[in-house]
Image: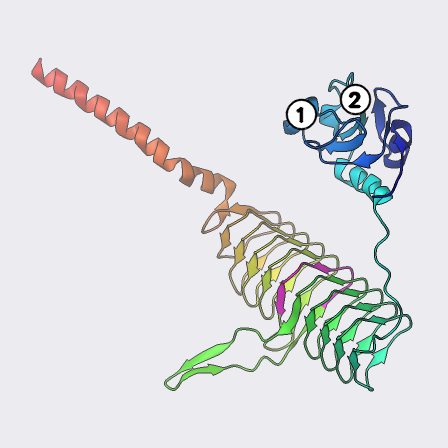
Amino acid sequence: MKNLTLSAAKIAEIVGGEIKGDPARTISRVEGIRHAGKDDLSFVSNKRYQHQLEASPAGIVLVCRDLADADASARTLVVCDNVDVAFGKIVALFAEEPPKYPATVHPSAVVDPSAKLGAGVSVGPNAVIEAGAEIGDRTVIGACAYIGHQVKIGSDTFIAPNVTIMYRCVVGNKVILNPGVVIGGDGFGFTPTPQGLVKIPQTGFVQIDDDVEIGANTTVDRARFGCTRIKSNAKIDNLVMIAHNVIVGESSILVGQSGIAGSAEIGRGVVLGGKAGVNGHIVLGDGVQIAGTSNVQKSLPAGAIALGTPAESQRDCMARLTLPRRFERLKKQVEELQAEVEALKKK
């Protein structure tokens, strides 16, 4: 981290927060609330973690509105409307500069003469760029990355080491593909015959729109026909599986190890929790939220919240999960009534 000292007053100015406590108090580092010391800035974004705030010796803490009345005698609080965004602004001030990539082609890289490289492109060691590929201005192609035939990549995109983008796929501007991402591998398509499984040609491509980020070792399969598409500003975690002909809507979030089967359509602003699965050929409307480890087997309307296997509404899921306890209570009541009946019979 950079060697930097900030006062509570300056921090409040940067994040647009309100100071509670000593505005002259200073910090020189940022840290999580459980590990922060008196010279550190930390944050608490939810009231249920108030006990961690009270136990922490952190010098300055960014807190949510629900904690505006917390004790500030041992520390200075900066009350914010959005703590996560505010903390991100301060962390950025302390962050070291990211690595600089020279606008050159490394001698060990293999670039086909027909490939077109824009101004300021960086191509790392042992990268391969095939015939007909087009790379936009200031894009970085990391070490050992593979850019297939006729691939088109926009400007200011970062392709990390060991990324594979197969033939004819399209990647937009300001996209980040983290290490090990595979774009455009064949979709899983086979037809059973008396002679065995016959491979179905996967003739389409993948299109990644602007401002998308895809996490390490995630795979996006080539369409069987047409295109598999990740729309702008979608954020995809590590180890996510996106099958052929899937459409992921703008600003959606897919958390680690989630998977989407072929031809499913995910609307705008959808959130899939970790290990959630989505069945093929269904539609999730805008703003749908799926809890982690859930299995979605049918289409859901916009704004729906679903959880469980099979995924269902919160109300239905809680009713099903509480049914065993309700049954036990009912069983106990029946046994008590039976005992009363037997007692009456004896009288």
Residue 181 against residue 30 in the figure, above or below: below
Q: Position of residue 71 (x, y in %)?
A: 74, 17
Indicate left or right for 218 with 104 as reference: left
Question: Residue 38 appears at what percent x and percent y?
Answer: 78, 26
Disc 2 designates what residue?
A: 75
Please state which amino acid type lies under the numbered disc 2. Answer: Arg
Q: CA distance from mark 2 to mark 1?
A: 14 Å
Pick whichever, 110 or 52, lies toward us: 110
The relative height of residue 84 versus residue 156 in the rendered view (above or below) is: above
**Magenta portion: prevailing SS class:** loop
Q: Position of residue 286 (x, y in %)?
A: 65, 53
Q: Is residue 209 magenta?
A: yes
Q: Residue furthest left?
A: 346
| Closer to the eye: label 2 or 1 | 2
Amino acid beneath label 1: Gln
Closest to the observer: 129 or 318?
A: 129
Q: Which residues are magenta?
A: 208-220
Read off the residue under disc 1.
50
Q: On the rendered image, what quadrant is the C terminus found in?
A: top left
Residue 311 seen in the current view: yes
Q: Is residue 41 left or right of residue 289?
A: right
Element type at mark 1: helix
